[in-house]
Amino acid sequence: MSFISSLPSSNAMTDEEFRLFKTLVYDECGIHLKPEKKDFMQNRVNQRMRATGIKSYYRYYKLITGDGADFKAELLALLDALTINETSFYRNKPQLDLFQNIALPELLHRKRAKNDFSLKIWSAGCSMGQEPYTIAMILNDVMTDIKGWKVSILASDLSLTVLEAAQQGIYPKEKMDGIDENSARKYFVEKDGNFQVKEDLKRLITFDFHNLMYDNGFSNIDVVFCRNVLIYFDMQTQKEVIERFHQCLAPKGYLFLGHTETLQGVNDNFVFIHKDRGTVYQKK
Ligand SMILES: C[S@@+](CC[C@H](N)C(=O)[O-])C[C@H]1O[C@@H](n2cnc3c(N)ncnc32)[C@H](O)[C@@H]1O
């Protein structure tokens, strides 16, 4: 029996309670939950209520909107529980081919000509780390002179749970789809049936908490990957987030979005580039 159907009816979330939580979640992290997501919300709020020993929605809402010592931590735990963290290595391969074969060579060429050997890449909404580790593997494969560069991959997420997993960099075999044997040997150590990212690759990446609703002071970023995150935001929030990306990108910097995400009607300060089913936006 599912948890929802085993709930006493008195514990079902009312429309008004749903509206309160939905508004709070939207204000805090931009995630826009439609009415059909009420069961999902109820389920996740109930999870957190069980963890905190609170029995009423009202009291739980008071806790996460109050000014008690634990309110921020509990609010973060609820937001964490509401995030969708699906990801994989080499997700959207045609787009990563475009990164590897077109955007990256153009960027490196431009930087070498200026004697600028620094490279800053941001994986925004990095989930369990497969995206930043994929980027690091591509850089390592392509840049034969990588040791002469100052490479930083900033990987951020709202969910502390996924950030911790990303930082550990340990993946079961079934999550290794997309990685060929060569790369598995080169970049991972096999341990008790799992695969652990080698330190050489890990040290290129800094994992950190960041809520995309806020500016983080980043500047001169060469490439932003923010894939499969905007889909959870409404148009207004997308506009604000994209404007912040535009500001933190270096001139001619690249922005990679998920394959269902578009800047059409959101921001026209980027040039759209597509090749062989891969797409990217470049700052004008
Ligand atoms: C579906 S995953 C995408 C992971 C990866 N970018 C990919 O394409 O495989 C979306 C991630 O965005 C994060 N996220 C959602 N809202 C966020 C926000 N306001 N700030 C930062 N990260 C957020 C979620 O925690 C989740 O890990």
Image (cartoon, grey):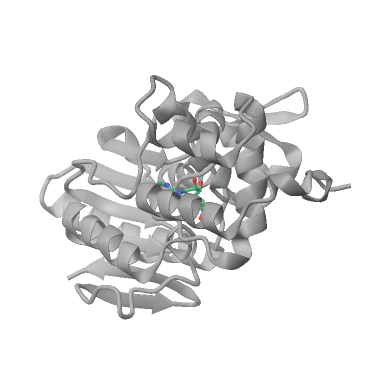
- Residue 245: image quadrant is bottom left
Q: How many marks?
A: 0
In the image, residue 97 above or below residue 120: below
In the image, residue 257 above or below residue 269: above
Task: Name which residue lies at 42% across and 55% down.
Answer: 23
Task: Name which residue lies at 70% across and 44% down.
Answer: 11
Task: Name which residue lies at 49% across and 24% down.
Answer: 199
Looking at the image, the residue that sits furthest to the top is: 69
Residue 226 in percent (x, y) is at 40, 56
Task: Name which residue lies at 49% across and 57% down.
Answer: 19
Residue 247 lies left or right of residue 160; in this view the side is left
Q: Quadrant of the C terminus?
A: bottom left
Residue 175 in percent (x, y) is at 69, 44
Residue 231 lies left or right of residue 165; in this view the side is left
The foreground one among 231 and 55 is 55
Residue 35 lies left or right of residue 6; in this view the side is left
Residue 206 lies left or right of residue 192; in this view the side is left
Residue 27 visible? The answer is yes
Residue 106 visible? The answer is no
The foreground one among 160 and 142 is 160
